[in-house]
Image (spheres, coloured by chain):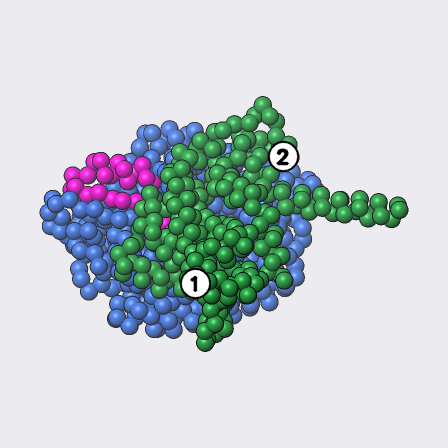
Amino acid sequence: MTAVTAGRALRWVALLVLCAVVAFPTYVTLATAFLPPRDVAAGALLPDPSHLTLDNVTNALDAVPLLHQYLVSAAVVVVQAGAQLVTASLAAYALVFPPWRGRRTAFALIFATLAVPGESVVLPNVETVSALGLRDTVLAVALPYLCVAYPVFLLRQAFSTFPREVWEATRLDGAGHLTCLARFVVPIAAPQLVTAGLWSALAAWNGYFWPLLITDSTEHRTVQVGLAQLVAGEPPTGVVYAGTLVVLLPTLVLVLLGHRFLVRGLAARLT
Amino acid sequence: MLTNVRRRLLAAAALSLLTVTAACGGGGATESTPAPGPSALTGAPVTISFWHGLGGAAGKALQEEVDRFNASNADHITAAAVFQGNYVDTLAKYTAAVRDGSTPDVLMANDVSTGFLHDAGQTVPAAEMAAANPADLHLDDLRPAARGYYSVGGKLLSVPFNTSMPMLYVNDALLARAGVDKASLSTIDGLVASARQLHTALPDVYGFTNPLADGWWYEQLTAAAGTPYCTPDNGRGARKVEALSLNAPAQHAALAAVTSLYTDGVALNPGGNNEASMSAFTSGKVAMMLSSSGGIGTINASGMTGYSALPLPLAAATGGPLLGGASLWVDGPGHDPAHQLAAWKLLTFLDSPQAQERFSHASGFAPVNAKVDDSPTQQAYLARNPAQAAVIDQFTKAPANSATAGCLSGALPTIRAGVVAAMDGAFAGRTPLDTAITQAQDAAATAIKNYNEQVGR
């Protein structure tokens, strides 16, 4: 009995330590963002509530048009993650249900692109997108990432669990492929679609190097590039932390709201 | 980690760019077309693009100067300044732009990129622009040390803009308690002896620290000894850099003396975290710190008072400090004479005494234009800011020779990484200094050989 209690206590302590380690950087970001620089330099990690200030946030928003770039980032997330869900659903459906020669090879090829470092295709992409006349547009930021392998992989695994007999029955009833996908497959795979959507949205929100390369004007830039502008050449002051917090906020909200799906998606990959 | 990936990408992109330019016969800084003269601007409106890597307060101050230029110039020139990421990102974007012919009219590039941009041959040398336009920027007004850093064979390649200097920051109270005289800190030997004296008198306090993860400091100790970092002659003459040299007697002695401070526990080793040096100094845990003049703003923001900024201690009479910062390049290929001249007008404005004074006060960088020293507002500013006055005093007196000009090679960023990695072992006491030096020199030899082969030399 005591052994069980001790084991439970140990598990709780371990969990608390882990939480503290993971949460500490976020806490420091939060505290530094809302404190005057002198308090931070003095190492006051337990903030004096009477010193709390919004100055750092105001200065960050004043230095770089982060709010406008927020909208650009939101647009990129909607276009990029939306397109990835559509293309991945179509691809995963084609890879799982209709029998056709070479679909295993096709999947292997798609899967292999995961091994190609994104940076190695950046320069050819710059040339292609520039040649299309799309340089320095919001569309250009999303263009090379409208279809990527990871959501395809995730949804293929999810669709594989769909009973094949049901699919065959709906086909025999005269349903077209798109109807099958939209009416029968997608509703059942909704949790994995949310997982894939979260993954795509986070990747789109966190993009930095490509948006920097392909945009030239401040107003077509994403919020991560704006944050880099706040940071470049500066020691990590309260203003930098305030900007970090502003940029981090949607990610935190997404993860907090969607963590159930993220965990489920990860677990689903293991089966 | 991302930064490392981007660095590798940049290296790959840079090499492919060099291959492209070499294949087109465009290697080297010599341009076939002459620099445009005053007649290139006809009064028609011209818009020029300007890529830079300054964020934060300095970026804001730069934008304000560009706005002033746009409001004031009589030639109907509009400059569009855009932040393109930090210096590494900006250069990566620039190399991508060379490939698809979309380079900006003006590029800001940091000190270590000078060798690469020289070899890339995409720019018009500043000396030629100045010679063709005697009514604009007078290069003689710029401080000799700044011109030296961005020159090869006596010819200025780019216009220095924002510069910083190495400074020795000392905690006045701690020095007084340990009985250290500031006058003894003008030499490396004096610095080392004082650091030991401090640590002996005040065992809770480290005598010295510097940001070891930054390759700039090994170059500073070398320049302080008056010896070239790269041979022959730091690549400033007719011949390209062939090797890294860390074994000249005065240079080796300086490196050994500073290393001994770390291995004896007298100096605080900040590891890979340069911020740790700074916070240890501002909190009084370290009595002396070598750091960039850009650190003055950070020290003041921390609320620390009672410190002095002293010039870099030297190890030879011919030695001096090496500057850091960035310069402005006028792009040639793909840019018509009107745009090239418009770019030069912008540079003339940005390096004018008035713009340099305002930018310096807002950003903390030292003004490159010596005429700023005559301004009454500048003199009043320096009277209020003794640390900044010490920076400018050192900048003015800095000797301009090939040793203090630093190593001019496109391989310099790679050389730096190798030196930091090797010397880290020496400072931590894991590797004997001479082994670390051999490792650094070997790594540099490979980097230089690979680079020179890519450039086709």
Q: Colour of chain B?
A: blue
Which residue is rendered at x = 42% and y = 35% of the image? A61
Residue B65 painted magenta = yes
The total of numbered circles placed on residues is 2
Which residue is rendered at x = 30% and y = 54% of the image? A135
Residue B389 seen by the camera: no
| Above or below, comparing residue A263 to residue B380 in the picture | below
Drawn side of residue B164 relative to residue A44, left or right = left
| Above or below, comparing residue B296 to residue A168 in the picture | above
Drawn side of residue B419 relative to residue B177, left or right = left
Local secondary structure at mark 1: loop
Instruction: State the extent of the magenta-drawn residues as a range.
Output: B62-89
Relative depth, front residue between B65 and B280: B65
Tell which tag, 1 or 2, sits nearer the viewer: 1
Q: Residues within 10 Å of mark 1 (few under 14, many from 20)?
A: few
Q: Residues within 10 Å of mark 2 (few under 14, many from 20)?
A: some
Q: CA distance from mark 1 to mark 2?
A: 66 Å
Under mark 2, the amino acid is: Leu
Q: Earlier in the sequence, mark 1 or mark 2?
A: 2
Q: Are marks 1 and 2 on the same chain?
A: yes
Local secondary structure at mark 2: loop
In the picture of the structure, the residue carrying the numbered disc 1 is A174
Per the rendering, the mark at residue A18 is none
Which residue is rendered at x = 39% and y = 50% of the image? A79
Q: Are marks 1 and 2 in contact (CB under 8 Å)?
A: no
Q: Position of residue B289 (x, y in %)?
A: 55, 44
> As drawn, which residue projects farthest toward the right?
A1
Per the rendering, the mark at residue A45 is 2
Q: Colour of chain A?
A: green
Chain of the residue where label 2 is placed in the rendered structure: A
